[in-house]
Structure formats: C-alpha cells, structure tokens
Amino acid sequence: VGPLVQCTTTESGEHIIAGAGELHLEICLKDLQDDFTGVPLKISEPVVSFRETVTETGPQDCLAKSPNKHNRIYMGAQPLGEELAAIIDSGTGCSARDEFKARSRYLSENHGWDLGEARKIWAFGPESKGPNVIVDMTKAVQYLNEIKDHVCSAFQLATTEGVLCEEWMRGIRFNITDVVLHADAVHRGAGQIA
C-alpha cells in the first residue's frame, strides 16, 4: 500500500490505518477493499491526531515529590522551537542517534543553546526519537545518575500521553533544575521516582 501507511490493531480488534492525509487514506482503503479483500469494509470518518505543546516558558518550576516524600525533582518546561522540532522529526541535523558532542555543537551553533546544557540532554521523546528533550541543568546533585533511567522512562510515558488530551507532546524542552534525593538507596528506587 505504501511506506507512508501505518496499520495498528486496538485491544477491541479495531484496525486503524494511518496515512499522509484524507485523500491518501481514501485511495488506500479503496485499494484494500477492491483489490485485496473483495469484501465491503466498515469505514469510519477519519480522525486527525493532535499534538500537545507549550507556547512559553512558565513563571516558575514545578515540584514533584516521590510517594514517600523523601525525594524532590524541580522541573520547568519551555518551547523547543518549531524549526528545531521539525529538524528532530526529520532525523537530519539533530537526533537521538547523533554523537552527543556533534549534536551539542550543532545545537549551540545553530539554535543558541548553551554548550554545557546541550551536552546534558538525557533523552528525546516520545519513542526515544521524538521532538521533545529532557535536559539536566542541575549542579552537583548526589545520586543523580542512579535515577536517570527512571526519569527518562517517566519522560517517555509523559510525552506519549500529554496532560490535556492524552495526545503526544511536541516541541517541548523539559529542564531538570534541581533534585533532592534521599541518602538511602531504598528510598529512591523506581517505585519512588518513575
């Protein structure tokens, strides 16, 4: 049918076909019905997927406390910029697969990022390649590497299901500005951080 078509099946057994636009889907469904199956298909109206984003930097950081109240993560969000989001989406110029020093230099020279901050990108998301990033902007936080995987896992989930309408997030830079962790490793595990 074509490389631009994605087919998935929901838990209820409904087949979802995603394409490059309404006309593209019409042609694909006609071919599927007439040329491949030969049976009438039950087709619903096309649904347009949305993306959630931020339009400006918030006035203050948000605080997230762990369930046991022993760990705190302070984080802010700001727009990544449409141009950079499109570049990350295309996978050219800046992506999660790039070597971090080259990526940092690119972000610094072409998009005005601080070189140190660009080197401390923890992850891209959703699906580890999307146009959202999480950046470690903390200074001298003990045990931070121990929770990095948990934070990145939570970041992947959060960017896949945005807060407003559970749609993917797009074009957001999440800045971790401070972290306070309990000295005992038992109190800062995955159940407490992610």
Image (tube, rainbow, N blue to C red):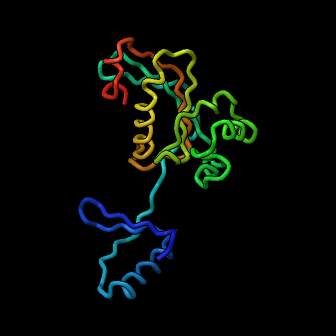
Depth check: give the residue in front, 105 or 30.
105
The furthest residue to the top: 183
**Which residue is at a point 65% across and 53% down the rendered structure image?**
92
Q: Position of residue 59 (x, y in %)?
A: 55, 26
Q: Position of residue 42 (x, y in %)?
A: 30, 77
For residue 23, say whether it is visible.
yes
Depth check: give the residue in front, 58 or 28.
28
**Is the residue 148 above or below the residue 54 in the image?**
above
For residue 163, say whether it is visible.
no
Q: Where is residue 184 in the image (x, y as percent from the top left)?
A: 35, 13
Q: Position of residue 78 (x, y in %)?
A: 57, 35
The furthest residue to the front: 99
Image quarter of the C terminus: top left
- Give the quadrant of residue 140: top right
**Is the residue 178 above or below the residue 120 in the image?**
above
**Which residue is at a point 51% across and 24% down the rendered structure image?**
61
**Is the residue 86 above or below the residue 19 in the image?**
above
Left or right: where 41 falls relative to 87 = left
**Which residue is at a point 38% across and 13% down the rendered structure image?**
182
Left or right: where 10 falls relative to 5 = left
The furthest residue to the left: 12
**Is the residue 89 above or below the residue 74 in the image?**
below
**Which residue is at a point 46% across and 55% down the rendered structure image?**
50
